[in-house]
Amino acid sequence: MKVKILSLLLALQAILSCQEFVEVGVPENQLISSTVFEDETTAQSAIAAVYARLANNSGNVSSVTFLSAFSSDETVCTSIGTDSDMSQYYNNSLQDTNARLQELWDFNYITIYYTNSILQGIETSRRLSTSLKNQLRGEALFIRAFCHFYLANLFGDIPYIKTTDISVTAMPSKNTRTEIYSQMIADLSDSKSLLAGDLSVSNSEKTRVNKFVSAALLSRVYLFNEDWVNAEAQSTEVINETSLYSLETELDNVFKRNSSEAILQLPPSGRAKYTNDANMFLNTPFSYLSEELMDSFDPTDQRLTKWTIQRNIGGLEQYSPYKYKDTPTNTGTVNEYSMVLRLAELYLIRAEARAHQNKILGAGGAEEDINPIRLRAGLEGIEISTVGEFLAEIGQERRRELFTEWGHRWLDLKRTKTVDEILSAVKPGWNETDEIYPIPRAEVLLNPNLN
């Protein structure tokens, strides 16, 4: 799209910007090219540049977390009339000239370009060890699938880009949903087979992709593809890895650095001591939690008191997400990392996959997966035997557990085909075509195949 296939100078900028993230130096004359992959330090720096991009985008004003919360029924936009780009998301009147739409598109495809550069560099490298090649390849494949997952679920049919070859990337055709999901599954399966299952690469932190991170995203992809058997199998593999992952018993600890529940986290970008998520939801007046979301909580639900906070926004007392506590006022140690994947989602994935297979009660049933989430929140367990009622309850539990995290609510409404029914009741201008974001006009003008 041209994929804004940036100049190599932009690649250099990304590498250099990640120096503090990985604490390694990068020669200023090095680019993402074959020379980078003849040296272990610079090869590691190349993949770190991609993680740095993810960290910088996570939770910011142009992230899927922030924008899709407006599109769904999670947050209310306070910038109507003053920021048309934000209000278009909230009013579901998104125009293809929207600047934040373009940023969302660009972020993912530029990141994909970097991962493909890494994969190409690994392929031609003569000096990297086999173990390091496998590690870097596995990480790059995961991130490539991750970015395509969001592109496909936001924009519909999009090109799945697997090369840096300009003759291919300049004017690619769109892939179908079936093709996109098949390629995501292939990338994640390869990633999982290449990676180790420990935290040695990131010094016992959960900030780099390992085989269980790939399995976690693979379980989500299978869920979205309605492959219930494989969604259950992949989520079970992660849940059973109790030496690395367990549900936090205290809600206040879930989003802390190296939480036991974390599967993949991203440290704050640069020298920040706080996450973008906390900054956007607690330090800015752009949004607050919707009445519909707040009303979905039982009054005794501890997530209501632990994960939301009342504050003055525009002269009114409204509620904001409070999953992350540290804002720019924090000048001490870094206490929180941005959560990308966590174990609670895997329990909810497995619960839904099992329910669709009519496995609800008893050992190996969906009830075993949803109740630990409810009990942690101070609620009673549920005993529902019918598939339809249980699936409805899982949908509500996902809403309460995963709100304002990586667009879960927006994507769930669409994949469960409830988006029209739910949003037409709370969004006056809702139209069924609003569930797909338009591809930016600038991209279509450059490449008519995207029309």
Image: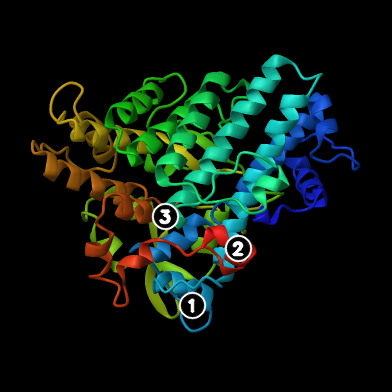
Give the residue number, with chain letter if any, for mark 3.
404
* First of labels 2, 1 by sequence position: 1
- List x then y, in percent, for residue 40: 79, 24
Whole-Å distance between the Cαs marked 2 and 3?
28 Å
Task: Give the number of the mark in front: 2 or 1.
Answer: 2
Q: Can residue 202 be seen in this view?
A: no
Give the residue at x 17% y 40%: 380
For the residue pair 321 and 264, the one nearer the viewer reads as 264
> What's the amino acid at mark 2?
Glu
Q: Do the residues labelled 2 and 1 touch (CB within 8 Å)?
A: no
Q: 120 left or right of 180?
A: right
Give the residue number, with chain letter if any, for mark 1.
79
Give the residue at x 77% y 30%: 43
Give the residue at x 62% y 58%: 328
Neighbourhood count class around disc 3 (C-alpha, 10 Å): few under 14, some 14–19, many 20 upward: many
> What's the amino acid at mark 3?
Thr
Considering every residue shown, the one lying at the far bottom of the view is 81
Q: In which quarter of the image is the N terminus?
A: bottom right
Total labels: the figure holds 3
| 75 to 181, vertically: above or below | below
Residue 275 numbered tag: none
Neighbourhood count class around disc 1 (C-alpha, 10 Å): few under 14, some 14–19, many 20 upward: some
Q: 223 left or right of 125?
A: left
> What's the amino acid at mark 1?
Ser
- List x then y, in percent, for residue 54: 61, 46
| 407 to 181, vertically: above or below | below
Residue 443 numbered tag: 2
